[in-house]
Image (spheres, helix red, strand yellow):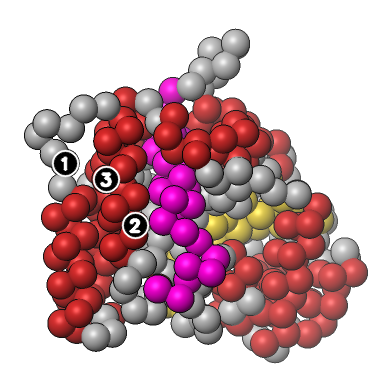
Amino acid sequence: MRARLVFVHGIGGTRDPDRELAAWTGALATGMQGAGHSQAARELLAGGLAECVFAHYADLFGSGQAQGGAGADDTGDAEAEILSELLVAWVDGLAEEHADGGGGDDEWDRRTLDHARAQAAPRAQEQGSLEVVRRALNVATTLMALKPWGAAARWVTPKLMVSHLTQVARYLARAEADAQGAGLDRRIRARVAEAIGDGPAVVVAHSLGTIVALESLHELTAPAPLFVTLGSPIAMRTVVWPRLSPRPPSAPGTVAQWLNFWDRDDIIAVRPRLERDVRANPAGVVPVSRRVDSDGTWVHSAEKYLAQPAVAGPVAEALSRPAFGPGGGGAG
């Protein structure tokens, strides 16, 4: 059976699926070359290594959110509550990372994080979702003063960052039903399920897409020789963890290998501890987290992760195995 490679995007604005597929494939090919899999990289670009599919769902967030602008101002009460919890978890995760030696100017960063933590704390007299959004904007503005993320303002503004976090909140709220009663999260997972299909698939997911892909794989029977998560917020234990489905979180039964990659300078995805918390599937598979270090100031992009040899190498190996099936991955 021909290999299928499924990309699942994360937070962000309007996307051109064809252009994104080309960009993600190109970045992955670069990483494959760096990992010593030049032949696989050439075959990938020529369309021979795998059938590549880009699972697109950004349009389901609606025009306001899709543009990454003022859509956050329309946040409902349920989403606002989750957004509020995300703020606290986000700052706490960054503070923990800083305490573990990930900071730049220690004293400056400590003061900045203390200020951000105070801003993130819910207000007793806070009225309505707009006040939560304003609080989120204040936190994001403060965090942009941290090194090395201040220079990332060229790629992301506080307003855009809050809009992106709101997408996570909207997915986890399990609301916004359509005319048929299907919630936003179900409609997003349906797109991913369609992309994965019935046959074996290597699934590579980024950011919010890691949550979507994890839940989708639990609902499907198609074997996944390799599941790769990049810049994932799954490890936000106080806000994402309790809202994952199914509970308690576990590796999907169809997954033969799960590799989770994180970058210390990724301001969106704090340091993961998935091995500690995710239960093994019946085959004993648990996520294995590996750190990568990308160049530049905005390292959360999927292309930055995909161009890493540590990420692309295992993908090339999984797609090149003669027996492309549920037992082909191994848990190493």
Mark 2 / mark 3, whichever is N-terminal = 3
Residue under numbered circle 3: 135
> x, y percentage for residue 163?
46, 45
Q: Measure the C-alpha gap from mark 1 to mark 3.
A: 9 Å
Is disc 1 placed on a helix, strand or loop?
loop
- Label 3 sits on what residue type? Arg
| Residue 278 seen by the camera | no
Instruction: Please tell me whether mark 1 or mark 3 is closer to you in this view.
Output: 3
Q: Quick one: 147 or 264, which is closer to the camera?
A: 147
| Residue 23 seen by the camera | yes
- Label 2 sits on what residue type? Ala
> x, y percentage for residue 143?
31, 65
Judge whether 87 appears above or below 37 on screen: above
Residue under numbered circle 2: 140
Please give the range of residues in magenta.
150-175
**Contact, CB < 8 Å: mark 2 with mark 1?**
no
Q: Residue at x 69, y 48 (%)?
A: 15
Q: Measure the C-alpha gap from mark 2 to mark 3.
A: 9 Å
Is disc 2 placed on a helix, strand or loop?
helix
Judge whether 307 appears above or below 141 on screen: below
Quadrant occupied by the N terminus = bottom right
Mark 1 / mark 3, whichever is N-terminal = 1
> x, y percentage for residue 43?
85, 73
> x, y percentage for residue 97?
25, 72
Query: Is residue 136 located in the magenta-colored stretch of the structure?
Result: no
- Label 1 sits on what residue type? Pro
Q: Quick one: 317 or 77, which is closer to the camera?
A: 77
Q: Quick one: 239 or 35, which is closer to the camera?
A: 239
Is disc 3 placed on a helix, strand or loop?
helix
Residue under numbered circle 1: 122
Query: Is residue 155 located in the magenta-colored stretch of the structure?
Result: yes
